[in-house]
Every structure is written in structure tokens, then in C-alpha cells.
Image (cartoon, rainbow, N blue to C red):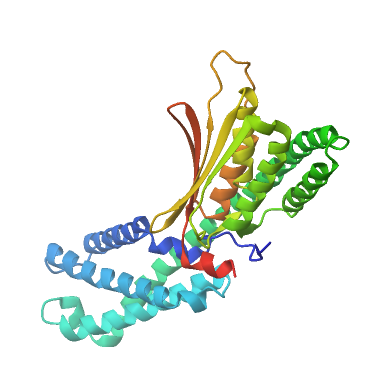
Amino acid sequence: MSTRTDPRPTGSYPLDALWRPSAILWIALTGIALAAVLTLAPGVGSDRWIYFGLILLVIQWISLLTLGALYLLRRPLSRLSPPRVAYVAVLLLLLGTWLVGSAAWLLMRGIWPEAGDDWPSLMLRLTAIALAVGVLGLAAFRNHWRARQLAVRAKQAELEALQARIRPHFLFNTLNTGAALVHQRPGEAERLLLDLADLFRAALAGPHEVSLEDELALARRYLEIEALRFGDRLQVRWELPRELPPVMVPALSIQPLVENAIRHGVERLPSGDIEVAVSTTSDTVVVRISNPLPRPDGPAVPGHQVGLNASQVRIEALTGGRGSVQTQVVGDRFVATVRLPLAAEHGAAGG
């Protein structure tokens, strides 16, 4: 069973946030705010609207150059620690400032009075502004990254607590089934214990990532155990593509949803079926687990939702918030839908 050894959650690298539309919008708005502050500052002799437009043009070009350089260097920068990446970003900001400032001095001296100063004086002023912005950005980044790391550690602790609550549930159901089979059908009891060993090996391994194929294999082993317990009462339907997408998923993120479908669906009915379907879009893998709803007049079973909460926390934590788990009632069936980001790095990780 392949695992991913990189402890860093998918999508958790600090530069990843810069390519999101919301981040680019905030960078543009920050540039507008900085241009407004410089325009309203005392000592601006020219028309303030013209000054605002020209200084905004310079600021936005510096921002675009810095973002472009960070994007082009994203692979070598991924090998650096986040604090060092922040210092490199400030250095690229200074380089962009000097490049755009020099171009402004050459091309805009006729329309922008400040560009008519001597080149060293203009560069000194622009460098001071860029350093001030860079230092403020460094302080904000350090606070943000520290808060994010604390949040990840808190999520990890929650994962481990949820995992500890799931393990006794595995053992309780399976040992009851094994005890009933050991004298009448010893061969099936042996297969049950082998499947249980695979499930516990995954549970005891701690939070990590496995391929979607391996995670579905765990779910299949669990359903084989439950098929021995329920017999003809349980029907399982698999709707899988010919080749499963090479996406990595958090270990024990889909199996608990299958377990919930058994406990809150089939277990409360004379007979029922579980359907597991996998489909893909251009950038997402969708896994759906559905089960029939129990009768309204049937006995109530308290839903502690340990399996659902565990899957949701795992997927959100290990995909950087890009994955999700949603539940809904469709007709007479309860459907749990898992959405996982399909990206190039997942394929590489599964190798």
C-alpha cells in the first residue's frame, strides 16, 4: 500500500495562496490604497489625479513583476523554508522596484515631474517605499504562517482523537461477526480476520495519504466483513471507471463513510444496498456513497457522526481546504459526496 511521506499537507505551501483570484485581487487593492496614500501625502506638486494614475501604474507593474517572478521560481523556492521564501519575495520586490523605477525614469520624465529628478534620488525614494512595504508584508506573513501552523497542529490533534474513537468501533463489530463464524464457517472467519488486520494496519499507521485505489480497497474489505455479518440483507454496487484517477486521499477518509452507510442505513432495515460510485471532472474526483434511508417509524439510532466528522476533518486538513465532504438526502437515499482536488502533484505522489 503506497503512502506519501511528505508531512506537509497538500496545498499548504505558503506561495500556493498567491495564485488564488482572491489573493491577486487583494494585492491589486493594496496597490490602489498605497497609491492613494502617496497621492494624498503633503508635497505633491502636480495634479493629484495625474499623479495617482501614474504612481498606480508603477505600483501595479512592480506587483505583477514580483508575482510573475515568484511564479516562475516556484519550484526551486518550494525547497526553501517559508521564512526564507518570504525574504526572497522581499528581494524580488526590490528588484522589481528598481526595474520599473528605471523604466519610469526613462519613459515618463516628460509627464511625471518626480521622474525628472536624478536617477539615484528617484531610486532611493522608491527603494525606501518598497522596503517599508516589504517589512510590513514580512510581519503580516510571519503572523499568518504562525497562526496557520497552530491551526494545522490543532487539526492534527483532532484527527488523532477522532481516530482513537473509531478504532473500538471497528473491533466491536468485527469480533462479534468473527465469534459467530468461527465454529460454523472457519474459512470465512479466517478471511474476516485478515481483512480486519488490513483495516487496523491502516488505522494504526496514523494520518497519512494513500492512493484512491488503496482507500477503496480498504472500504471493499470492510464491506466484505459486513457481508459476512448481514448475508443476503446487504447488497453492494460499485460504479468505478476502468482506471481510477491517480489521486491521493487521506487514509481512512472514505471507509468511515461506508461504515456510516451500514450503521445508519442497512443495519436498520430488513435489507438494503450500498452504492459506491467514482467519477471525475477536469479538476475534481467525486466519490459518492449512498444508502437507503431507514423507515420513519423504525428505532432511532443516535448519530454521533464520528465517521463523517473524521472524514471531513482529514480531507480538509490534508488538501488545504480544497477537498470537501457533503451529505444530502436524495429521494429515499442518504448520499455522502467526497470531492478531492485532481492535480498533477497527486499523480507524482502516488508513484
- Determine whether 157 is above or below 43 in the image: above
In the picture provided, is 22 more to the left or to the right than 45? right
Name the residue at 59% across, 36% down.
235
For the point 27% across and 60% down, the residue is 37
Q: Nearer the viewer, residue 105 or 212?
A: 212
Indicate the position of residue 1 as horizontal and vertical percent values: 68, 61
In the drawing, does residue 264 fall left or right of residue 25?
A: right
Q: Quadrant of residue 52?
A: bottom left
Query: Which of the 4 image quarters holds residue 209?
Result: bottom right
Q: Quadrant of residue 263?
A: top right
The image shows residue 18 at horizontal and vertical percentages of 41, 63
* Residue drawn at (42%, 27%) of the image: 331
Is residue 186 shown above or below 146? above
Residue 124 in view in this figure? no
Image vertical order of residue 89 relative to residue 267, above or below: below
In the image, is residue 237 above or below residue 232?
below
**Quarter of the picture holding the C terminus:** bottom right
- In the rendered structure, the answer to whether residue 274 lies left or right of residue 185 reads left
Residue 329 drawn at (x, y percent):
46, 29
Number of numbered discs: 0
Residue 27's spot in the image, x, y percent? 34, 61
In the depicted view, which residue is nearer to us: 39 or 164?
164
Furthest residue to the top?
297
User: Would residue 50 be found to the left or right of residue 303 on screen?
Assistant: left
331 and 8: which is toward the camera: 331
Which residue lies at the image location 51% right of the left edge and 67% below the top edge? 345
